């Protein structure tokens, strides 16, 4: 299966600090979900930010290695060029939503891509249905609960129809029903050929993963078929 | 999708009232302009009482203005003097009244936009040929002030929830508390602002020199008439005032 | 025994008109441990804020130790009921972790030496010693959660409300938080945990209620 996004021996260090990622390599292929778990501070969010091109463009860091998007070096692309193909949803929904209505949020990305207005409306209708936020279109995002905000943040990124979707602990604030909806959305995206990179603490949310890795101390290791308490303790650094 | 008045019409009305507020120096003229602004707000369904609530917040500033004008303007009839220094005069009272009314007119003018949201303002600026990046940045920058104020208020709430009764703390210590939380409030607002910037760029902001606008309001005939009336009225007032 | 926290027919709607709570009744004693569950947007955080008096009900009464909660100043409420925000960053205002924990103690009449001792104790209890001089915003999410709880516990409240405390925590940090909350429970301090995390709540709470359609079930 051809990779859409390939990370090759990536090393990232914050200025004046230790390496957060220390030689990470992985491939994201069309229609496949790659799951990543691991302890806090292990580099998961840093990997997401680097894969989305936000590091080092908006968040300065020392970067070695390379990331290829459809064969092109990410370093040769501008952030808008990357954003048109790679979507990222962060853990904190509050700062991902900055417009007065949910409708404005869903339209923002497609508007930036200069899509025709009828197509934007069509995309808004579709993502609102898929994510279950049709009734929230006129709502002020600031008045929504944290979980609802997260759903809207995801919908806003999906409206851009990215080829690669990066989800950084998006289910953290979601109730079980919303988590199930996310799983359905991911399944539909995989069917449509989207490559998905999903970072989670809860393995249950990675049930659809084709590949599962653990990112610890900046290094990737494969997750065993059977995850038990002893493995969790070794990975998370606690006695079982 | 198009509302009346269009946001551009409202921006022009704001500009007209602000121009009058800055150009007029006589308190009677300023009072007349304020009355006109309040009547226009009422006609738009915006309660003039809201202006009263906003003005209350600035009463400290008004007091300072009145004192400053009284002490620095000694023209006209003297009401109060002390050892040869004029403390209160008719000139000072007029200047103080004009300063207060000027601020009231500007605040009233701003209220014309109170029912427009941030997206509508951005769209209006772009329709007025402001580059869209600048329109978003200006309005995000303006929004930074309420974000910072909200961070400050949240920090004050957090302090009180830690058992610190600000009403019972002596003034000196209260000032120390406020200065203590200023840095984290600024840092918090800046961190939030940076995250918003990242979120915007991650959704392809500035990907193209032009972007589509889902909602692109059109000016109606009534908007043109209202704009013409606003400009004509402003010109007439200025002409009469300077005659 | 009169309730420590009492809600009587509490209704709440946002200014936009959206009704969130419809006639909620709830009574809790000081050492009760309650899980408040419900789907996104059901009003859990709103209920937590009503109990703290950060929001006013549209109708009904919210009482703390037998008196309407609004009769207490915000500081008095904070001394008696600790509140950990859903986003812990919202309650940080100090320049370092140690200052964050010790800030309020200075106002309670503790001497600098006593403040230092108490802060050291809490840093150790919540496993934050290595971050004592760190800027709170630079901590990881799990560390921020523990810091928020440490700062609240510095005041030795009688009760604590925690809004989604396990959100974003990995397995180890969740266990650490559970250990910390078990310690608090052993000291006789009750709490309400607002959460979706059934397993987390099952380990920590003796009872659970669910908000659905604005009502408690």
Image: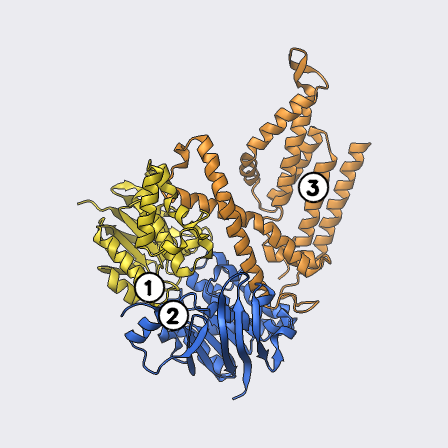
Q: Which residue is mark 2?
A: A201
Residue C85 coordinates in the image, percent (x, y): 39, 53
Q: Position of residue C202 (x, y in %)?
A: 25, 64
Indicate the quadrant where residue A113 lies.
bottom right
Front position in the image: A93 or A42: A42
Q: Which residue in the rendered view is the most extreme toward the right? A: B243
Q: Quadrant of the N terminus of chain B?
A: bottom right
Q: Is residue C137 visible?
A: yes
Q: Position of residue B182 (x, y in %)?
A: 51, 43
Question: Mark 2: which secondary structure?
Answer: loop
Label of residue C174 in the image = 1
Give me the chain that's blue: A
For the residues labelled 3 and 1, say whether their Cβ atoms are less than 8 Å apart.
no
Residue A32 placed where, x, y %?
Answer: 47, 83
Chain on which label 1 sits: C
Q: Which mark is residue B17?
A: 3
Whole-angstrom CA distance, mark 3 to mark 1, is 58 Å
Q: How many marks?
A: 3
* Alpha carbon separation for disc pair 3 and 2: 57 Å
Secondary structure of residue under mark 3: helix
Q: Report the residue at 37% width, 53% height from top.
A: C147
Would you say residue A128 is visible in this rendering? no
What is the CA distance from the residue labelled 2 to the residue labelled 1? Answer: 10 Å
Q: Is residue B7 left or right of residue A29?
A: right
Residue in view at x 63 percent, y 31 percent: B100
Q: Can you say whether B67 is above or below A21 in the image? A: above
User: What letter labels the chain drawn in orange?
Assistant: B
Residue at the spot x=32%, y=53% of the render? C124
Question: How many residues crowd around disc 1 within 10 Å: few (fewer than 14), some, or many (20 or more)?
Answer: some
Mark 1 secondary-structure assignment:
helix
């Amino acid at each position: 299966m051809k990779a859409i996004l390939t990370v090759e021996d990536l090393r990232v260090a914050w200025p004046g600090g230790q390496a957060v990622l220390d030689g990470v390599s992985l491939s994201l292929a069309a229609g496949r979900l790659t799951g990543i778990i691991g302890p806090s501070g292990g580099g998961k969010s840093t990997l997401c930010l680097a894969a989305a091109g936000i590091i080092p463009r908006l968040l300065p860091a020392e970067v070695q290695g390379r990331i290829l998007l459809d064969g092109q070096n990410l370093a040769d692309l501008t952030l808008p060029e990357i954003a048109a193909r790679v979507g990222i949803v962060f853990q904190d929904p509050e700062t991902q939503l900055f417009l007065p209505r949910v409708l404005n949020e869903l339209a923002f990305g497609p508007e930036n891509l200069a899509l025709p207005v009828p197509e934007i409306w069509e995309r808004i209708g579709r993502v609102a249905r898929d994510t279950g936020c049709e009734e929230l279109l006129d709502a002020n995002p600031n008045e929504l609960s944290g979980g609802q905000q997260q759903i809207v943040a995801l919908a806003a990124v999906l409206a851009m129809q990215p080829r690669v979707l990066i989800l950084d602990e998006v289910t953290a604030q979601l109730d079980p029903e919303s988590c199930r909806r996310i799983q359905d959305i991911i399944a539909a995206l995989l069917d449509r050929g989207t490559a998905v990179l999903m970072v989670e603490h809860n393995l249950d949310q990675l049930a659809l993963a084709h590949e599962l890795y653990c990112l610890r101390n900046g290094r990737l290791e494969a997750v065993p078929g059977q995850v038990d308490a002893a493995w969790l303790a070794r990975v998370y650094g606690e006695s079982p | 999708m198009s509302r009346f008045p269009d946001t551009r019409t409202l921006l022009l009305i704001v500009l007209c009232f602000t121009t009058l507020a800055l150009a007029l120096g006589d308190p009677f003229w300023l009072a007349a302009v304020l009355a006109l602004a309040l009547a226009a707000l009422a006609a738009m369904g915006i309660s003039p009482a809201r202006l009263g609530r906003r003005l209350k917040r600035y009463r400290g500033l008004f007091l300072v203005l009145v004192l400053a004008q009284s002490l620095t303007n000694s023209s006209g009839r003297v009401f109060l003097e002390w050892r040869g220094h004029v403390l209160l005069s008719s000139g000072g009272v007029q200047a103080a009244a004009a300063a207060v009314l000027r601020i009231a007119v500007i605040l009233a003018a701003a209220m014309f936009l109170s029912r427009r949201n941030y997206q509508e303002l951005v769209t209006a600026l772009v329709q007025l040929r402001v580059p869209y990046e600048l329109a978003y940045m200006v309005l995000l920058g303006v929004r930074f002030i309420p974000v910072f104020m909200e961070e400050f208020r949240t920090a004050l709430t957090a302090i009180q929830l830690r058992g610190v009764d600000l009403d019972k703390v002596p003034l000196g210590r209260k000032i120390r508390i406020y200065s203590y939380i200023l840095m984290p409030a600024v840092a918090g607002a800046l961190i939030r602002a940076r995250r918003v910037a990242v979120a915007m760029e991650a959704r392809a902001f500035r990907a193209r020199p032009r972007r589509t606008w889902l909602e692109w309001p059109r000016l109606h005939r009534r908007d043109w008439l209202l704009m013409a009336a606003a400009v004509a009225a402003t010109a007439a007032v200025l002409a009469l005032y300077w005659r | 025994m009169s309730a420590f926290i009492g809600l009587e027919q509490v209704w709440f709607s946002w200014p936009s008109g959206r009704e969130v709570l419809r006639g909620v009744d709830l009574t809790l004693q000081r050492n009760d441990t309650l899980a408040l569950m419900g789907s996104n947007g059901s009003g859990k955080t709103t209920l937590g804020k009503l109990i703290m008096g950060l929001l006013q009900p549209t109708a009904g009464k919210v009482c703390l130790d037998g008196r309407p909660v609004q009769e207490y100043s915000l500081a008095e409420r904070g001394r008696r009921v600790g509140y950990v925000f859903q986003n812990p960053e919202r309650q940080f205002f100090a320049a370092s972790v140690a200052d964050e924990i010790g800030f309020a103690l200075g106002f309670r009449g503790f001497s600098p030496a006593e403040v230092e001792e108490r802060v050291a104790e809490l840093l150790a209890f919540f496993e934050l010693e290595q971050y004592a001089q760190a800027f709170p915003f630079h901590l990881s999410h799990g560390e921020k959660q523990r810091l928020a709880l440490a700062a609240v516990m510095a005041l030795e409240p009688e009760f604590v409300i925690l809004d989604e405390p396990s959100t974003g925590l990995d397995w180890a940090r969740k266990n650490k938080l559970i250990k910390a909350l078990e310690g608090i429970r052993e000291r006789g301090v009750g709490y309400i945990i607002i959460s979706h995390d059934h397993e987390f709540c099952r380990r920590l709470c003796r009872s659970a209620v669910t908000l659905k359609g604005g009502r408690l079930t």
